[in-house]
Image (spheres, helix red, strand yellow):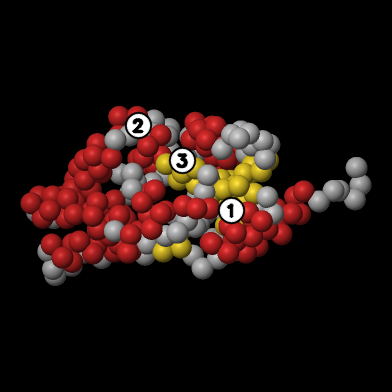
Amino acid sequence: MGGGRVLLWDFDGTLGQRPGRWSGTVMELLDRVCPGHGYRGEQVSAALTGIYPWHRADQAHPQLSEPHAWWQRMTEVIGEALVRLGLPPTDAATAAGLVRAQYTDPEHWSLYDDTLPVLEELSSLGWRHAVLSNHVPELPILIRFLGLAPHLEAVVNSAVTGYEKPHPEAFRIALAATGDPEQVWMIGDNPTADIAGAHAAGIRAILVRTPDPGVPRHAPDLTALPALLAAEYEPHARR
Ligand SMILES: [Mg+2]
C-alpha cells in the first residue's frame, strides 16, 4: 500500500441511486400505513429537511457508529418530523419504524449505466477506487449487492466513522484508508459535501452529473472522466 493514484467516489447520485431517496421512501410508507393521507411529496421532503446527520456535518457523531444506535436516532427524528407534519403519533411511529427496511432494501437501489464501465476503464489506466459517502450503516451491503465491491479498495462511510462530508476528518480518514495516495481526486455530485469538502482538505475534485456555477471542473456523466483526468496530467506545452 501507499502511493499511487486513487479516486474517492461519492456514492448516492454519483455511482448509484434509490429513486425517491429519503422523502420517496417515507411517502411509500405513508401510502402503506395511512392510505389517503393526502400529503404531497414536497411537504414530506420539507418536513424531513435538516434531520439527517449530514446536515450537521460540523458535528462528529461517534456515538452513532453502531448500526442500531444510528437507526434508533434516525427513526426518532423521522417520527418527530412526521408528527410536525400533522400525522397522529402512532402512525408517525409506525411509518418511521419501517424506514430502515424500506430504505435499505437492495432491490430499490441501482447503479447508473456508466458506473461499472467507467470504473473498469479507469482501473485499466492505473486508478484505484474507494467510496467516501455520507450514508446509512448498510452501505457495504448495497455495494456488494450492486456488484461494486470488487472494484473498491475501501468504503469509508460516515455512519461508521462518525464524520460527514464536508468535515475534513472524513477526507483524512479516506486518504489513510487508501494508503495516502500520491495522486487523489474526489468525484461527486454535491458541490458542498464533495467538492468544497475535498478542496478544504487539499484534494482536487470533479463535480459530476448536475452542474453548478461555482464549480468549474464538471463532467456531465462519468464517461467524461477518463479524458478529464488525462488532461490534468498531460505535460504542459510551456513550462
Ligand atoms: Mg451524492
Q: From the viewer's perspective, is residue 177 above or below residue 147? A: above
Cα distance in 3D space between marks 1 and 3: 19 Å
- The percent position of residue 40, horizontal first and vertical second, equals 25, 65
Measure how far apart labels 2 and 3 are at the Cα level.
15 Å
Q: Secondary structure at mark 2?
A: loop
Q: Quarter of the image containing the N terminus?
A: top right
Label disc, if present, on residue 156 of the rendered structure: 3
| Label number found at residue 61 | 2
Kind of residue sitting beneath label 1: Leu
Confirm or reject: label 2 Cβ below 8 Å from ligand 1. no
Nearer-the-camera pick, 106 or 195: 106
Q: In front: mark 1 or mark 3? A: 3
Q: Are the residues tagged 1 and 3 within 8 Å (C-beta)? A: no
Could you tell me which residue is drawn at 23 percent across and 39 percent down? Answer: 68
**SS class of the residue under badge 3?**
strand
Quarter that holds the C terminus:
top right
- Residue most extreme to the right: 238
Q: Report which residue position mark 1 lands on.
A: 207
What x and y, as percent, mark residue 126?
68, 50
- Element marked by disc 1: strand
Mark 2 / mark 1, whichever is N-terminal: 2
| Relative to 160, 66 lies left or right | left
Of the pair 70 and 122, the residue shown nearer to us: 122
Q: x%, y% of residue 231?
A: 76, 54
